[in-house]
Amino acid sequence: SVEELENIVRTIKNKLGSKLFLPGHHYQKDEVIQFADATGDSLKLAQLSQENKEAEYIVFCGVHFMAETADILTTDEQKVFLPDMRAGCSMADMADIDQTDRAWTKLINRFGDTILPLTYVNSTAAIKSFVGRNGGATVTSSNAEEMVRWAFEKKQRILFLPDQHLGRNTAFNLGVALDEMAVWNPIIDRLEYEGELEKVKVILWKGHCSVHENFTVENIKDIRQTKPDMKIIVHPECRREVVELSDLAGSTNYIINEINRSEPGSSWAIGTEMNLVNRIIQQHQDKEIISLNPHMCPCLTMNRIDLPHLAWSLESIDQGNAHNLIKVDKTIAADAKLALERMLGNN
Ligand code: 13P
Ligand code: SF4
């Protein structure tokens, strides 16, 4: 029963004390978040994992790339576990390392040594390693502008992996025109671009988040019509035209902060993951808050981490037979760490 599972989690947490660290991403289910030692967006959870020198076991309640990041940033003695190995990320899966190597060779042939690669942390360790090896850095949604600015101080052009929308929205905010951005299509190994190639400043990998792509211009028009006073706030993983028509756009943290500091009685439509939106609704009963898309679902891979998997994972650790260890290959981890530290050093 739920009570039994909760008891297992509680008992093992008490027993292991500070030997165990349980970070929980904001998009996790309530049944998991209630047990998290810290909640946060991907930047905060990466920072906390790096700072935590005490924990022997880090049971990461988030998705696979976040657990990999925690493993890269912690010591060899610290072990990172993911309660369900199927908790991946469809966006991270949209850039594999062979496709990226092929793209890089072609881009270097075309543009010479003028490109710096950046990758959203929502990517595999192998992609982070490729980026680190080539002088680039990781970014998260809360520091993307800072990191793109940093990259442009070093090189004339950037390759932004794997989320075209975060890349486009961020570059646009920094004054890069849409016709100075090209899209790299990894399926056909080619740039999608109509204009003069010399003009290109940003090469966007053709990946996206299957959750945030579900917010549409139609959703915005509906809200504007039915609730003209409602403010619309969205995550920059949403398409350009959705961000364009919204009132505000920013990272998970930014969204939480904006709602927190808004007046009682204010009304909001939020364009981000549903577990988080539901939690925000619960926490702000004095405000009118809805999802921008009324038919929105939670992120299915985030949802694979549930109470039964958490209890099972903790039990396996407690019994000395731990399952689902996340261990990034040493050679990959070294270069990936360079990319992560260039970001963390800038924050
Ligand atoms: P942030 O936590 O950086 O806002 O990322 C959102 C996300 O999609 C995580 O998977
Ligand atoms: Fe990946 Fe999108 Fe889910 Fe985040 S919300 S884990 S980017 S699929």
Image (cartoon, rainbow, N blue to C red):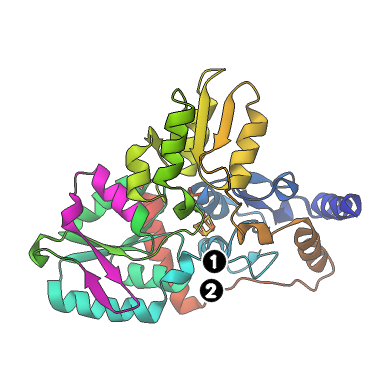
Q: Tag 2, which secondary structure?
A: loop
- Identify whether 12 is placed above or below 220: below
Q: Tag 1, which secondary structure?
A: helix
Residue at 35% of width from left, 77% of height from top? Answer: 187
Residue at 34% of width from left, 68% of height from top? Answer: 131
Where does the magenta region start and end? 166-192
Mark 2 and mark 1 lie on one chain; the one further toward the N terminus is 1
The image shows residue 339 at horizontal and vertical percentages of: 37, 63
Relative to residue 143, is residue 287 drawn left or right?
right
The image shows residue 292 at horizontal and vertical percentages of: 51, 40
Task: Tell me the quarter of the image containing the N terminus.
Answer: bottom right
Queried on whether the Cβ of the residue with tag 1 lies below 8 angstroms from ligand 2, the answer reads no
The residue where tag 1 is placed is: 68
Queried on whether the Cβ of the residue with tag 2 lies below 8 angstroms from ligand 2, the answer reads no
Question: Is residue 180 in the magenta section?
Answer: yes
Relative to residue 85, is residue 333 drawn left or right?
left
Mark 2 crowd level (few <14, some 14–19, many ≥20, 10 Å Cα): some
Mark 1 crowd level (few <14, some 14–19, many ≥20, 10 Å Cα): many
The image shows residue 57 at horizontal and vertical percentages of: 69, 61
Q: Dividing the picture into quarters, in which one does residue 192 lie? A: bottom left
Say which of 191 and 84 sits in front: 191
C-alpha span from label 2 to label 1? 6 Å
Q: Amino acid at mark 2?
A: Val
The numbered mark at residue 328 is: 2
Q: Are marks 2 and 1 in contact (CB under 8 Å)?
A: yes
Relative to residue 87, is residue 221 drawn left or right?
left
